[in-house]
Amino acid sequence: MQTRPAVRRIAGNLVFLAASLLAVSFIIFAVMAAVPGDPAEIMLGTSAAPDTLAALRSELGLDQPFLLRYGDWLAGLMHGDLGLSYTYSTPVAALIGERLAVTLPLAGYAVALSLAIALPLGVFAGQRPGGPVDIVATFFSQIGIAVPGFWIGLLLILGVALTLGWFPTGGFPGWQAGFLPAITALTLPAIALAIPQAAVLTRVTRTAVIEVAREDFVRTARAKGASRMRALWRHVVPNALIPVVTMLGMQISVLMAGTVLVENVFTLPGLGTLAYQALAQRDLIVIQNVALLFAVIVMGLNFAVDTLYAVIDPRLKATR
């Protein structure tokens, strides 16, 4: 009974996602096309002969009209051809593929840590407002929201890596060195990314638990003999997760933006470092593709979060 409306909604969201990505790709391409600078000169240098520069512009398709170049870029994306880096003279797809092996596990690690911190802390703080756990959670939320991730990264390097020597100060040995060395190298950067996100999610979880605990259906469950813990885990927590999931979806874009700074602090060879280097070297084709990839990741995860509502929110199920 409820499957068909849910499928229609997911199909509608997919169409909206595709249209949004197309619009974002056009905006990114237009902005990169408007940035001053000649990619051929970046690749060959300003001392290159005019004929050589013209030949390279023709080879790269830079002498074609704007819409034709945009269409060629989209067609290349469909086939995995993202163009040639102006500074590295290697396929952009290969560069991004190497960096994704660092950034995606780092982002996933940070999200897992933030949820592991925020959910229990927020739930137990909301269960007893004003109690010791609530005081700790409120203090943690205020500090975590106020301090940016890259600054937390610097503190972790000074306090944990240099003083205690428990983790490396930076760098990444690669997954070929083994899972443990690789995950150890990602731990401090993941903590630096996770703490601000966990602070926000802790506050949202705490507030949601307090509000849901005051609802009539929770009081009814308690009046029928449900224990405090049963009412909490059976009725309060599932309903309190809805705003948490909403905020988690909104925080994903903040997390991906934070990787640019945190990866540079820890000298990780990820997408953030690649974007920063490409920006410094005016490698516009790399910036263009990395920006689109960030957009795809953020919008794709937000689509997944929106779809998840149908699983965790029975009210939405009923209306679809």
Image: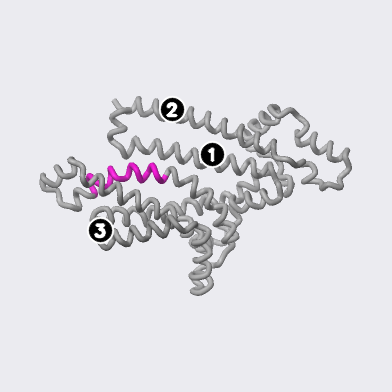
Badge 2, how many Cα within 10 Å: few under 14, some, many 20+? few
The relative height of residue 88 versus residue 137 in the rendered view (above or below) is: above
Name which residue lies at 33% across and 37% down: 311
The relative height of residue 19 versus residue 149 in the rendered view (above or below) is: above
Kindly identify the amino acid type of the residue bearing the numbered disc 2: Ala
Farthest residue to the left: give it.
224
Instruction: Pick whichever, 202 or 115, lies toward us.
Output: 202
Name which residue lies at 86% across and 40% down: 52
Q: Is 241 inside the magenta-drawn segment?
A: yes
Of labels 3 and 1, the one closer to you: 3
Farthest residue to the bottom: give it.
163
State the image coordinates of residue 80 (x, y, percent, origin top left): 63, 37
Name which residue lies at 75% across and 29% down: 64
Instruction: Pick whichever, 237 or 200, lies toward us.
Output: 200
Q: Main secondary structure of the magenta part?
A: helix
> What numbered label is drawn on residue 296?
1
> What numbered label is drawn on residue 258?
none
Badge 3, how many Cα within 10 Å: few under 14, some, many 20+? few
Instruction: Pick whichever, 33 or 174, lies toward us.
Output: 33
Answer with left or right where residue 117 lies relative to residue 57: left
The mark nearer the N terminus, 2 or 3, is 2
Q: Alpha carbon of mark 2 to alpha carbon of mark 3: how far?
A: 45 Å
Residue at mark 2: 11
* Image: magenta residue range: 233-248
State the image coordinates of residue 85 (x, y, percent, origin top left): 71, 45
